[in-house]
Image: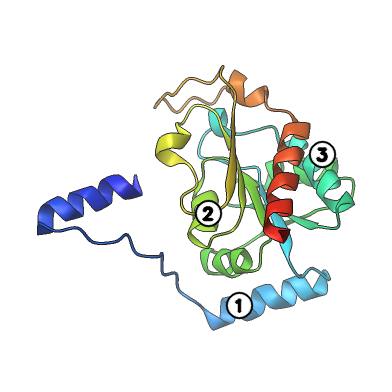
Amino acid sequence: MVEQYADLARAAIGRSLPIPEAILPCDPIAEETVEKRLRSLEIREPAILNPGAGWGAKQWPAERYGEVAQALAGQGLRPIINFGPREEALAKVAETASAGTAHALSFSVGELIALMRRARLFIGGDTGPMHLAAALRVPIVALFGPTDPARNGPYRTPSVVLRNPASATSLSHRMEPDQGLLAITSEEVVAAATQLLERSRA
């Protein structure tokens, strides 16, 4: 989509321009707030897990995020489960399934930008936080179901996109779980995360 909009701009002005880097605000108060919250939890470079999504068919099961958090904690990462308005129940399920290895935390938009600047890894579906992570060049494991990663996937950042062939692209905002998305296992997500982490260390 970024490239499509860039094509529209080229057509409008009659010449080609490079696609610029995303410029996001830096709110000193948000930066300080996030720094204090992370310091209180003794977290420096979190792995951010985001179980929420715009509608049900885009949501990977919350308890699997907890399973992934356990595996990441075993690799020395400190997982944070990010949640937004009306996502408290999802976050609680994921936190409980993490067996104490992850913290469920909510952030304002400015705080979420500050958090992403400190992140080692992001795991989640086709959501605003995923695109925010991409804009800040955070490595991403993206879990896709009914939306098309060729259109909506992570842009300009190291990423692994997981999508099962059973998922069909649909613009309908269904609440029922997408069967292809459900077919993605916790083990696949952990393997993708490990791959990205190893690549970032190389």
Question: Residue placed at 29% from the left, 61% from the top?
Answer: 18
Residue type for callout 1:
Glu
Q: CA distance from mark 3 to mark 2?
A: 25 Å
Q: CA distance from mark 3 to mark 1?
A: 29 Å
Position in image of residue 190 (x %, y %): 76, 40
Viewer can see residue 133 = yes
Q: Is 2 on the left or on the right of 119, as rendered?
A: left
Position in image of residue 61 (x %, y %): 69, 32
Number of the front mark, 1 or 2: 2
Residue type for callout 3:
Glu
Which residue position holds label 3? 67
Contact? badges 1 and 2 (CB < 8 Å): no
Number of the front mark, 3 or 2: 2
Which residue position holds label 2? 157
Residue type for callout 2:
Thr
**Image: 117 above or below 83:** below
Among the two numbered marks 3 and 1 on one chain, the one whose residue lies closer to the N terminus: 1
Disc 3 crowd, CA 10 A, few/some/many (<14, 14-19, 20+): many
Which residue position holds label 1? 31
Question: Residue placed at 82% from the left, 39% from the top?
Answer: 67
38 or 131: nearer the viewer: 131
Disc 1 crowd, CA 10 A, few/some/many (<14, 14-19, 20+): some
Position in image of residue 108 (x %, y %): 56, 64
